[in-house]
Image (cartoon, grey):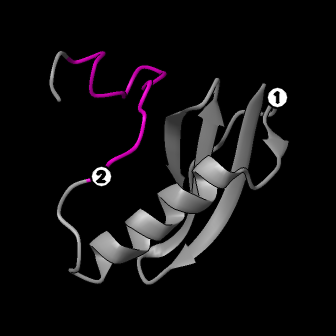
Amino acid sequence: MKNIFFYRTYIGKIGIVDSNNSITNVYFHDESFPEDAILNETELLKEANRQLQSYLAGKQKDFMLPLAPQGQNSCCASGKL
């Protein structure tokens, strides 16, 4: 099951998706997101938002989250991390 939740940041509204206990996608306000995702703020999404807000505030440089990138524009699709 895919879960999505939207967060306000100073760079705009961001949607974060998790599936099978990993972050799979991040969407900016003008991007379409998966219609099969359920609007549900999981503990993992809360933690992803906490780390993202900390990163944007300049307090954190690395993310410590389980990642499983999905889609054509994911870092793994291009072979870059």
Q: For mark 1, does the 10 Å Cα neighbourhood hold few (<14), some (14 to 19), or many (20 or more) residues? A: few
- Looking at the rendered structure, the secondary structure element under dot 1 is loop
**Which residue occupies 42% across, 26% down?**
69
Residue type for callout 2: Phe
Residue 57, position in %: x, y?
A: 29, 83
Under mark 1, the amino acid is Asp
Residue 77: percent from left, percent from top: 30, 15
Q: Could you tell me if residue 29 is visible in this image? A: no
Residue at x-position 41% and y-position 74%: 53
Q: Main secondary structure of the magenta part?
A: loop
Q: Which residues are magenta?
A: 63-78
- Where does label 1 land, which residue? 36
- Disc 1 to disc 2: CB gap under 8 Å: no
Comparing 33 with 62, the one in front is 62
Q: Is residue 57 left or right of residue 40?
A: left
Nearer-the-camera pick, 8 or 54? 54
Q: Which residue is mark 2?
A: 63
**Image location (x, y in percent) of residue 63:** 29, 52
